[in-house]
Amino acid sequence: MKVLIVDNSEVMREVLEEAIKEEFSVVAEAENGAEAIEAVDTYDVDVIMMDMVMPGIDGVEATATIKEKAPDIKVIFCTSVTQQERMKPAIEAGADGYIMKPFENSTIREAIHDVVS
């Protein structure tokens, strides 16, 4: 599986990459929704680990745009408990799953397996 990691926090992008790199290929990283949309046009992506709250184009808006272009790409939101109420718009935009921050490395890998199987 080829994974795109989208998060405005460099530290969170590193945490996600570290958690999945042994099992999945991280093909690109983006720090906002606009970069995520560009990355989908540039890279062959199977799964996106998407942050919800980012400056500019947020995760929900980026997901809606990406799903219009490439509906087969799976999107997993990485969100905090305080944002759980915002999951409904994310699902309506096309999210295939979500994990709650903070998370265990195994939870991230399981989420990817869940959406691709």
Image (cartoon, grey):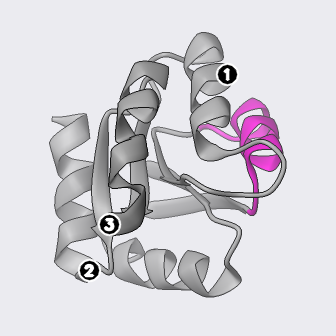
Q: Mark 3 belongs to which amino acid?
A: Val
> Label 3's element?
helix
Q: Earlier in the sequence, mark 3 or mark 1?
A: 1
Per the image, the residue denoted by label 2 is: 105
Residue 75 shown in magenta: no
> Which region shows up in magenta?
31-44
> Label 2's element?
helix
Q: Mark 2 belongs to which amino acid?
A: Asn
Q: How far is disc 3 from disc 1 in space, using C-alphas?
A: 25 Å
Q: Nearer the viewer, residue 109 or 64?
A: 64
- What is the x, y in percent for residue 27? 61, 57
- Residue 27 visible, this orientation: yes
Per the image, the residue denoted by label 3 is: 81
Q: Nearer the viewer, residue 101 or 42?
A: 101
- What is the x, y in percent for residue 62? 67, 34
Per the image, the residue denoted by label 1 is: 65
Determine whether label 3 and label 1 are within 8 Å by CB: no
Which residue is at a point 28% across and 66% down the rendered structure image?
108
- Residue 62 against residue 6 in the figure, above or below: above
Helix, strand or loop: magenta stretch: helix
Residue 39 shown in magenta: yes
- 74 left or right of 115 in image: right
- 31 left or right of 27 in image: right
Determine whether label 2 and label 3 are within 8 Å by CB: no
Q: Which numbered tag is attached to residue 7?
A: none
